[in-house]
């Protein structure tokens, strides 16, 4: 994954990463953090927000992912993205 801090076209990268992971896109207001995004992800009761070079995931009401969904995400082969200098 590349570092998206300050990257104005962060939404393009975020959309691609979420689609590859099979996570629903949620469009919203532009974030005010270091990564300027307006797309986040939603899977079951989980929300995914992109940070510099990692994802922050949080669950509503402390609910986890169903085991079969977590196993599918873990076992899926993902492309390797380069790092931004």
Image (tube, rainbow, N blue to C red):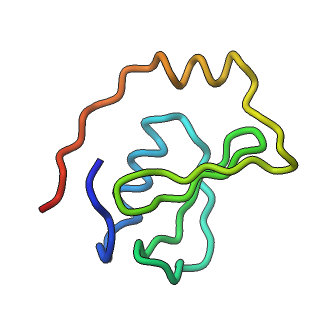
The picture places residue 15, in percent across and down from the top left corner, at: 44, 53
Residue drawn at (42%, 76%), measured in percent from left and top? 36
Residue drawn at (48%, 78%), measured in percent from left and top? 33
Vertical position of residue 69 compared to residue 61: above or below? above
Q: Quadrant of residue 5?
A: bottom left
Q: How many marks?
A: 0
Report the quarter where the C terminus lies. bottom left
Residue drawn at (29%, 73%), measured in percent from left and top? 7
Decide if residue 55 is on the left or right side of residue 78: right
**Extreme residue in the right direction:** 61
The picture places residue 61, in percent across and down from the top left corner, at: 87, 49
**Extreme residue in the front direction:** 62
Vertical position of residue 7 compared to residue 41: above or below? below
Decide if residue 9 is on the left or right side of residue 65: left
Decide if residue 1 is on the left or right side of residue 72: left
The picture places residue 67, in percent across and down from the top left corner, at: 71, 18
């Amino acid at each position: 994954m590349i570092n998206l801090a300050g990257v104005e076209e962060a939404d393009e990268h975020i959309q691609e990463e979420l689609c590859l992971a099979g996570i629903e896109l949620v469009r919203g207001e532009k974030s005010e953090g270091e990564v300027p995004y307006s797309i986040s992800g939603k899977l079951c009761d989980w929300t995914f927000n992109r940070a510099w070079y990692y994802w922050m995931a949080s669950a509503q009401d402390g609910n986890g992912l169903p085991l079969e969904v977590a196993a599918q995400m873990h076992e899926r082969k993902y492309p390797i993205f380069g790092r931004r200098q």
